[in-house]
Image (cartoon, helix red, strand yellow):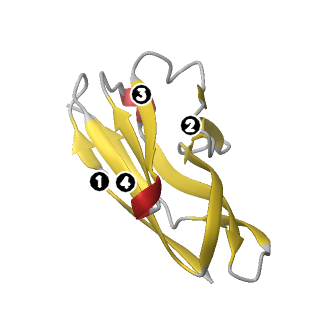
Amino acid sequence: QVQLVESGGGLVQPGGSLRLSCAASGSIFRINDMGWHRQAPGKERELVARIRGGGTSNYADSAKGRFTISRDNAKNTVYLQMNSLKPEDTAVYYCNINVYDMNLRYLEVWGQGILVTVSS
């Protein structure tokens, strides 16, 4: 099995910053894509940012210029640095990875979600 543990969420004022982390553990052979999605109340889950195994990344339009995704392959960890946060960034953020486990099964794994609240 492969597990994800997210951290770094919480309450922040508009204009502030947060850094989310997501660490993968378990039966990991190789992690391909790593990403962050979010789901705001009453809305569908949407992609925020994704980073591929080679390091290239893409962002939702709402995240461009404010959020930065990065990864530490030695730690099997993906980060999301969020700056200039807005109330509309309030959501539950989910980490997501595509991974080959030690049995070479290709899995899509989701974290449990972490709440980010942007409010004064």
Residue denoted by label 1: 8
State the count of labels: 4
Q: Is residue 12 above or below residue 108?
A: above
**Which residue in the protein does label 3 denote?**
67
Residue for badge 2: 55
Front disc: 3 or 2: 2
Residue located beneath label 4 in the image: 21
- Residue 105 position (above or below residue 69): below
Residue at left 24%, top 45%?
11
Disc 4 marks a residue whose amino acid type is: Ser
User: Badges 1 and 4: C-beta atoms under 8 Å apart?
Assistant: yes
- In the image: residue 53, left or right of residue 62: right
Kind of residue indicated by mark 1: Gly
Q: In the rendering, at what x and y percent does residue 22 appear?
A: 43, 58
Please state, as top left, top right, bottom left or bottom right, where the C terminus lies in the image: top left
Q: Earlier in the sequence, mark 3 or mark 2?
A: 2
**x, y percentage for residue 54?**
61, 40
Q: Amino acid at mark 2?
A: Gly
Tag in front: 1 or 4: 4
Q: For mark 4, does the 10 Å Cα neighbourhood hold few (<14), some (14 to 19), or many (20 or more) residues? A: many
Kind of element beneath mark 2:
loop
Mark 2 surroundings: few (<14), some (14-19) or many (≥20) residues within 10 A: few
Q: Amino acid at mark 3?
A: Phe
